[in-house]
Image (tube, coloured by chain):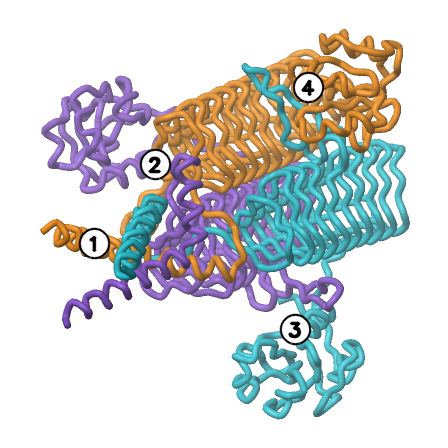
Chain colours: A cyan, B orange, C purple
Amino acid sequence: MAQNKNYTLKEISLLLDLSFRGDGSCEIGGIATLENANAGQLSFLSNRAYKKQLTTTKASAVIVEEKYSGLCKTNALISESPYLSFAKATALFVKPQIPEKKIHSTAQLHESVQIGDSISVGPNVVIEENVSIGANSIIGANSYIGNGVIIGEDCRFHNNVSIYHNVKIGCNVLLHSGVVIGADGFGFAFDGEKSIKIHQLGSVEIGDHVEVGACSTIDRGAIDNTIIGEGVKIDNQVQIGHNCKIGGHSIICGCVGIAGSVTIGKNCIMGGGSGAVGHINIVDQVQVSAMSLVSESILEPGVYSSGTWHMKTSEWKRNNIRFRQLDSIYKKISKLEKVKKENKNMDDF
Amino acid sequence: MAQNKNYTLKEISLLLDLSFRGDGSCEIGGIATLENANAGQLSFLSNRAYKKQLTTTKASAVIVEEKYSGLCKTNALISESPYLSFAKATALFVKPQIPEKKIHSTAQLHESVQIGDSISVGPNVVIEENVSIGANSIIGANSYIGNGVIIGEDCRFHNNVSIYHNVKIGCNVLLHSGVVIGADGFGFAFDGEKSIKIHQLGSVEIGDHVEVGACSTIDRGAIDNTIIGEGVKIDNQVQIGHNCKIGGHSIICGCVGIAGSVTIGKNCIMGGGSGAVGHINIVDQVQVSAMSLVSESILEPGVYSSGTWHMKTSEWKRNNIRFRQLDSIYKKISKLEKVKKENKNMDDF
Amino acid sequence: MAQNKNYTLKEISLLLDLSFRGDGSCEIGGIATLENANAGQLSFLSNRAYKKQLTTTKASAVIVEEKYSGLCKTNALISESPYLSFAKATALFVKPQIPEKKIHSTAQLHESVQIGDSISVGPNVVIEENVSIGANSIIGANSYIGNGVIIGEDCRFHNNVSIYHNVKIGCNVLLHSGVVIGADGFGFAFDGEKSIKIHQLGSVEIGDHVEVGACSTIDRGAIDNTIIGEGVKIDNQVQIGHNCKIGGHSIICGCVGIAGSVTIGKNCIMGGGSGAVGHINIVDQVQVSAMSLVSESILEPGVYSSGTWHMKTSEWKRNNIRFRQLDSIYKKISKLEKVKKENKNMDDF
């Protein structure tokens, strides 16, 4: 665990804007779960199922809600939202992996590249013509930045990242290793014998504060641009097709696949492995469960799912045989109901 | 939008082999949708749902079918297949990102490498022994080409591409960034305690005019080769297992996973996120819907699906409880039918 | 096919610890299927469906069970487990692609890096501070190894691999091209307006004899480490979320997505494209079918599935309409049963 700096409880309470109870001079050097914490570590209670652990934890301090603070046998930081306070606390204890603020001698920058102050460009990075990189941005080793790409300030691209020509990336954007932005959207017209490529004339625009996970891919648009809104967080192995528009602060979990020309609203959550077919619209505040397929537009906020639950395969097979017969089962029932109704009518006589 | 060259309407009509109506000297510098087009841009109508926009579009010319050309208030290019003509038109307006036709000074080519005329090898590319690269092919920065790989003419590999030893790639093959071809197929034999690796002795053969999307992977065969037929188009994040054979001109959409030893016919379409279990056969002209699993061979052309539609999770849960009971529900109905039949028989007396 | 060395049948029988029948001096130079084998090649019968091919194969020798050896018209190697013996035989015929045991002049190793004997570091590899690499390990071209990474002996990393800081990797670990280990787990706390990043303070530990397929990603832990047990085999395009623990010798097939904090037992098999939601526990010896979702903990060994079988889309649609109505269908049946029961009670009078 890369935890290097110590804070007093009082310092943490000031940094996180929380009140504390107990020994303000107590030293904290890291974060752990209630169960695994040792002396010198900070913990938190966000799920009340674990509240019993407040009495046994060895943590030197715990972030808790006021109402549970009485149970806490150690120092407490009082928060209305311990999970959010925990998130902020991680920023204190992360050991940032910041490379030197220089352009490595093996990096290949075209003479037209424009760079802000204090940027870092790693070994073997290739940056083509007319690229612009904002101040304090970091481009990791072995990455490739195509012609005309614009990168804002305070961005961090990890290693082996590939950005195609003319992609526009905002400020404070974090791209993990293996990310590919701006590859061709998947568009062909069939001429009766073979697929004719639709050259992808659009590009990709990525808003500020976006994070994209390892090996995720975002395709360039066919005509207009693919657009990733501000604050969108994308996990690993995600595929976003050409001309998608993802609304601000939406969350796209791992292994999601979104076909072309899908519009997703703000503050949506696409669960892990979920998908959306092309040319549909999903409004704001929609949550899609893991591995569910959105097969038509969703016009009301809410939680949506498809598929079936797992069960023992033997049982699943028996039920699946009946799923295959479901329409005929329905018809049998309708017949039975008709008979019942006739019988009832008979009775009426 | 990377659109740089202007054509007159007449020039376009000649290049696309279409007749036109209106002002042949009208200048066109790009492509846009009917809705977003401005003066100087070409548009097209392929979905009649948008035909009303023919009367309002600001496009300087529109590709339309004869039957809708009367509605068009601007210049028209008459096509039997506007979508196909649009695809061909994109080739006129794409600004090709062609690197210099040279071998970059930082590229590492083994002395035995054989190269055709006018190839381009980007910075930091590593090319091992006995590789052969056909004329006009382009290998993007930071790519790796293993021993004995054969690459045809007019290929384009983008950046950070990895090709393992002995892979054979045809002509006019387009590989996007992050593609990995020829990694080991996933084969193990369990010895009761642990998995013993089956070394993958085969390779991969990729036909002419194949396109492979970003971060897609095609594994080498266990004994024989994995084979991707001519004109196959593969989207991003696709996994093709060892010893698969994909027939000519099939389309594999994003996030598809195909297990080992699957044979897919010609002109098939595997929808986004769909999959196929191992050792099965899918005939020509089969279309599999998004996120559907092909769990046994498909022997008749047609469209196939699995899974269920999305719905509100509350409703989905209620139905899923019943799915779990489906076999017992079926048995209840059979009992009711039996009673009905007995009653009917009783009535017959 | 990369097969270069010849063995006599007798040599093979000694190397695989099997008895043989026939001509021990017969020369074998490769492996093929019963159907495709030529003279000079070794084959095997592991699926009895192919036993007829024993009479027609041109293979110079076949690995068979004792009970089928009588059918074999050619030399035989007698094995209790022909598939396992075949796996071992592939090790004899693979032509290993071993790069030179040297540190390439273009590799960038920090002066603090500690290396064992006979390691190989390819061109353009970047290795940061305090990394340690065990004897005989191979790091492929254009890979990146972050600060403090520990790599055991006899590892093989292919090309364009990215390892983040402080990841610990055991001995005999095989990583394919495009693999990313130790990227940030996907963790955010919503503050009512935007997602606050939970910095990922943990790392990843990978046991001995692990294999990870092309473009697979394993995220670092939020607080504790993500742990991949000894002998785990992971196929291509797999995503393993932060704080997962995968038990020894489990098999994770292609395109699997495992959300955060999932514990999977020993000797499990996650079928291709399957998934697991976060914070659940799967015991030892569980097998999950292709594209199935594990949506809650599995506490008993066995085979589990979710989803439905593929069928023609027209039929599937009819059944899916009824799936949507399944709960109301169930209620209709309950009503019919009630009527039946009342009738029955009536009859009793």
Q: Amino acid at mark 1?
A: Lys
Q: Is residue A181 left or right of residue A100?
A: left
**Circle number at residue A83:** 3
Q: For the residues tagged 1 and 3, is the chain the same?
A: no
Q: For the residues tagged 2 and 4, is the chain the same?
A: yes
Tell me the CA gap for discs 1 and 3: 60 Å
Callout 1: chain:
B
Tell me the CA gap for discs 1 and 2: 37 Å
Please identify, in this view, whether the residue under mark 1 or under mark 3 is nearer the observer: 1
- Do callouts 4 and 1 mark residues in contact (Cβ within 8 Å)? no
- Do callouts 2 and 4 mark residues in contact (Cβ within 8 Å)? no
Q: Which residue is mark 4?
A: B82
How packed is label 3: few (under 14 Cα within 10 Å), some, or many (20 or more)? Answer: many
In the image, residue A200 above or below residue A160: above
Q: Would you say residue B201 is visible in this rendering?
A: no
Q: Residue at x 62, y 67 (%)?
A: A1
Determine the secondary structure under disc 2. loop
Determine the secondary structure under disc 1. helix
Front residue of B333/A200: it is B333
Of callouts 1 and 2, the N-terminal one: 2
Kindly give the residue lying farthest to the front in the view shown. Answer: A349
How packed is label 1: few (under 14 Cα within 10 Å), some, or many (20 or more)? Answer: some
Q: Residue at x 74, y 35 (%)?
A: A164
Please identify, in this view, whether the residue under mark 2 or under mark 3 is nearer the observer: 2
